[in-house]
Image (spheres, grey):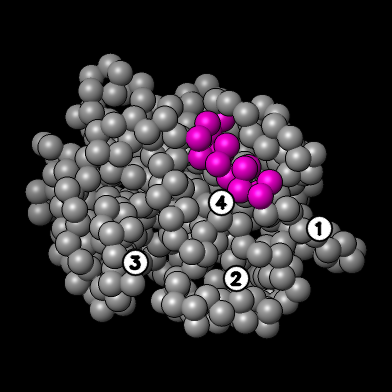
Amino acid sequence: MSAETMGVEEEFLLADPGSGATVPLAEKVVARASAADLPVGATVQRELRDTQVEAATGVCRDAAELRAYLAAGRRAVAAAARDYGAVVVASGSPVRGSGGAAPSSLARFAAIDEMYGEVTRDYEACGCHVHVGVADRDTAVAVVNHLARWLPTLLALSVNSPFHRERDTGYGSWRIVQQSRFPGSGLAPHLPDYAAYRAEIGRLVECGVVADEAQTFWFARPSPRLPTVEFRVADTASTVDEAVLQALLARALVRTALAELSRGREADPVPAQVAAAAVWNAARYGLAGPGVHLGLYRRVPATDLVAALVEHVRDALAGAGDLPEVHALLDRVRSGGTGADRQRRAAGLDGFPAVVTELTLRDETGAVGVTGSRD
């Protein structure tokens, strides 16, 4: 992946269309979807639970290319799941879980289950991961330092997991609450270079709390397998539009960080406890309440933080030609609410079956609704 290109990995849940309970069909769905006519570079693969699949785009240079990849991946997994009597649900956590997921059938994931025990038993969390190309891994670490103060705002924009076992948790992102139970979650430590980053992970591995370098849950990190900065903060997007919004903002943040670094401006560390407060507020309230300003160290309306983020990356968005689209996509979030807001509205109108219906991916070309592009 060349500098400042982007790609997205979307994790989804497989569910019974009648009950909404998650179903362990990943092996079959991945095999069927992988045989579909996917765009060059796109893949479909397994995730931690056998009730999850991941659709990954190829390397993209602009929003239109990314949108086409995302739509194709969603169509492929939706069609494959339909062939086995299941649906694909775009939510950060299941509305109804499986009642206790079986250990993973893949060796690495089974080892993770063994390491964490009960913590992973009901962990069917799904995220939207954005990759942005950078020149090298030392640069990636310096960029991650610059990203820290903005990552809770990306989370607040993305919240899409308010329910757990058919109960409203009161959080916009229950996925993040579940993730916080693992070592190596939250904001990455502020580090000087990639050697220090590797050493930090090595210590966690030696302490027996993460399986390997690829297993950290930090919200942004140098990718362990690609020359990218990997954003892992967002819940799975219920719409293509919201996945595109996360990607464009992520790329603009990287571009802005690179511009700062070119002027010799390193990021200041963010106090760990204040960072934790910012993450908690974002997961709890989304855009509907307070957030924590990681420069002023106090609560402000989350919507003010979104405005500050856009202003921070304005030049990068304008330079890429993305500013009008980001404004339009943000307007849609403001008018329609976050994914968590829409899930709650659906539950209030017609109960939890309506939430599953609203979150179900469609495989028809050009399908619209909460799971498709609204362009």
Q: Amino acid at mark 2?
A: Pro
Residue at screen point 62% across, 29% down: 290
Residue 234 appears in the picture as rendered = yes
Q: Nearer the viewer, mark 3 or mark 2?
A: 3
Q: Return the residue found at the far front.
A: 207
Label 4 and label 3: CA atoms lie apart by: 31 Å
Q: Nearer the viewer, mark 3 or mark 1?
A: 3
Viewer-proximal residue among 33 and 179? 179
Q: Amino acid at mark 4?
A: Ala
Q: Where's residue 166, x and y in %?
A: 24, 33
**Placement of 201 over or under 342, stated as above or below:** below
**Badge 3 is on which residue?**
116
**Badge 2 is on which residue?**
222
In the rendered structure, which disc, 4 or 1, sits on the residue that comes first in sequence?
4
Label 3 and label 2: CA atoms lie apart by: 24 Å
| SS under mark 3 | helix
**Badge 1 is on which residue?**
268
Image position of 202 (left or right of 52): right
In the rendered structure, which disc, 3 or 1, sits on the residue that comes first in sequence?
3
